[in-house]
Amino acid sequence: MNKNFLALGLAAALLAPQVAGAEGFAINEWSAEGVAMGGARMFAEDDAANVAYNPASITKVKGEVMKSSYTYLSSHGNYKLYDGAGKEIEDGKNVVHAGWAVGSYYVRQINDKEWFGIGAFPRFAMVSEFERASKASTNAFFSKLNGVSVTPTYAHKFDKKWSAAVGAEINYVGLELQKNSYHPVAQMNVGATQTEGESYALGWNAAANYAFDDKNEIGVVYRSRITHSLEADFKMYPASGGKITADAYGVVTLPDSWDIGYNHKFDKKTRLELKATRTNWSTYDALNISLSNPSVPGVLPSNVDSAKNWSNGWRYAIGLEHNFSDKYAAMAGFAFDEASIPYDGGDFIVPTGLRRTYSIGARYNDKKQTVAVALGWMDVGNLDFAGHATDAYKSAHAYDSFTKIASISYQRKF
């Protein structure tokens, strides 16, 4: 093994900046090729990003490869707010707050049967922002979840038909929530609050591929749920001036998921992938925060609770890849993501309905390097949700929401 290349690959995977943001919560944009194929990229040949899409497929990598991917996501949308009588009291739009999904991958073939891979990429992340003087701000005016998963992976190829992989997942989340505190009796804002903290937690994943023949293959990937015990700092800035601080604590469980994929090669140039993802969003049943040790005793509540009760959902994707020659290829994809947010569990932290994503891309490769680019457009759909007791509205309607996506990847073989 070339120790310098291994050290470089590990450093790239572990130390690359991982800043993500999007209209939504689940991130599927792990490489330009993956974006181009709608996320249906479980069976790619010689692609280090298989660490993210399907660990069992790192057995398709020959030799030693390293890859970096940068995906730009820019969300846009509008909303209307209503009072208890159903009268519109405000209309507005989100503050455009673009984010990046960054992926770094390293894969090395140890021998004819064994592979090692490691990736650093975001599985869950989001950012949303609204005008601080709006009524929507009483629910949330700035919300951000930065997330990254580091996944060391071992894969084994049993024979021409079977391959499997198992890996650990070191998951990081950094959470920041800001909102205006609204007094429903006085009908006025009484100050702004900020909750900010971070956490590390462990999970695992497993995958298996089976090839029926040279043209047809299926694969399954399972990713475990991950429970974060989040310790955070809580700050309140009363309208009358000053600052109140407290310790905050909450538990957030990121859901487990199943990926099921099918790959069909029409010939040596063209192939089609189908993918279905089941995500158990029901783990996100509440966002409850406990407060303790306030700097001004008796002013802050001991708990800030918010029921969510999301439902489990499916994401379906189809991707097409066509090689015009040994060097040039084109890709296209479509994905449909079910809405999982109930009327009583919606908010301006993640104001997302069902999602339809349309994408295209192109790739150039030679014996040592691969460069891919992709463009996507995500129709986020509409979402209606109820206000909470401390919100300055009774119901909300998010509409005309969409996300622009642009991605580039670079891979190097050693």
Image (cartoon, helix red, strand yellow):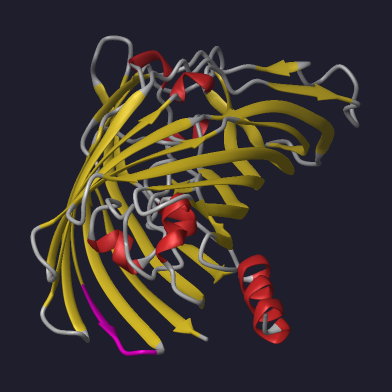
Question: Which residue is located at x 40 percent, y 68 percent?
Answer: 47
Which span is picked out in magenta?
362-367
Residue occupying the far front of the picture: 159
Coordinates of residue 277 in the picture (x, y in percent)? 33, 35
Q: Is residue 389 left or right of residue 378?
A: right
Q: Is residue 362 left or right of residue 152?
A: left
Q: Is residue 315 left or right of residue 168?
A: left
The picture quadrant where one finds residue 114 is: bottom right
Whether residue 127 is situated above or below residue 62 in the rendered picture: above
The picture quadrant where one finds residue 73 is: bottom left
Q: Is residue 361 visible?
A: yes
Whether residue 255 is situated above or below residue 17 in the rendered picture: above
Coordinates of residue 342 in the picture (x, y in percent)? 35, 17
Which secondary structure dominates the residues rendered in magenta? strand
Q: Nearer the viewer, residue 336 or 74?
A: 336
Q: Is residue 345 left or right of residue 405?
A: right
Coordinates of residue 143 in the picture (x, y in percent)? 53, 43
Q: Is residue 116 magenta?
A: no
Question: Which residue is located at x 32 percent, y 10 percent?
Answer: 84
Total numbered badges shown on the rendered structure: 0
Q: Nearer the viewer, residue 88 or 149?
A: 149
Question: Which residue is located at x 45 percent, y 60 percent?
Answer: 59
Whether residue 183 is situated above or below residue 131 in the rendered picture: above
Q: Is residue 357 visible?
A: no
Coordinates of residue 231 in the picture (x, y in percent)? 79, 35
Quarter containing the N terminus? bottom right
